[in-house]
Amino acid sequence: MSKFNAIQVGDKTHLNRLITKGDIATFAELTGDRNPLHFDAAFAKKMNFEAPVAHGMLTCSFLSTLIGTVMPGEGSIITNVRLDFKKPVFIDDIVCVNIEVIKKIFLSKEIVFKITITNQLSETVVVGTTKSICLE
């Protein structure tokens, strides 16, 4: 049975990840985004944040981990992502990236997932949807 056929609407998976200062530095090195909001505590406070903020796309990058390695896994590719950032993520926050299958498109072998990312306080930091093609 193919992975696409095995996956059902309502299936869920998640990943927990501690966001470190090193993660933020590595992400900045890879992307070139060295906005002081991510590194300078005084600047972050001036912008009304309690501390430097993790890159939003760093937080959401773990969607790729879930979809590419867990569900659907190998042979899948993300084709669309829609995100709404609700709260900032800070150094030493633990994010829980949750995806749930909300729709299957049989003709194109696409799977639509609901995204909910929370922090260690169970506060929602990101919501959205993503679509993946399951090639296997």
Image (spheres, grey):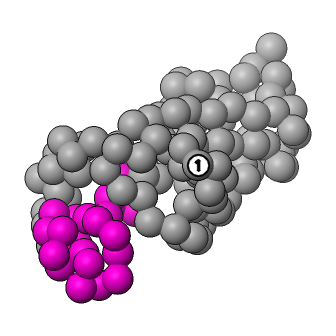
Between 67 and 135, the one lying in front of the other is: 67
- Would residue 85 appear left or right of 110 to someone viewing this image? left
* Residue interval drawn in magenta: 37-58
- Against 39, residue 114 (above or below) is above
Mark 1 Cα shell of 10 Å, populated few (<14), some (14-19), many (≥20): few
Locate residue 81: give its quadrant.
bottom right
Q: Quadrant of the C terminus?
A: top right
Q: Which residue is mark 1?
A: 121
- Against 61, residue 135 (above or below) is above
Q: Would you say residue 107 is visible in this rendering?
A: no
Between 9 and 3, the one lying in front of the other is: 9
Residue 30 in picture, x, y percent from top left: 16, 51
Residue 121 in picture, x, y percent from top left: 58, 49
- Against 10, residue 115 (above or below) is below
At horizontal 18% and vertical 68% (from top left) the residue drawn is 41
Residue 51 on the magenta span:
yes
Residue 2 in picture, x, y percent from top left: 75, 20
Residue 4 in picture, x, y percent from top left: 76, 30
Residue closest to the far right: 9
- Would residue 46 appear left or right of 112 to someone viewing this image? left
Residue flagged by tag 1: what amino acid is it? Answer: Leu
At horizontal 52% and vertical 33% (from top left) the residue drawn is 16
Between 7 and 19, the one lying in front of the other is: 19
Q: Quadrant of the N terminus?
A: top right
Residue 130 on the magenta span:
no
- Against 130, residue 66 (above or below) is above
At horizontal 23% and vertical 51% (from top left) the residue drawn is 24
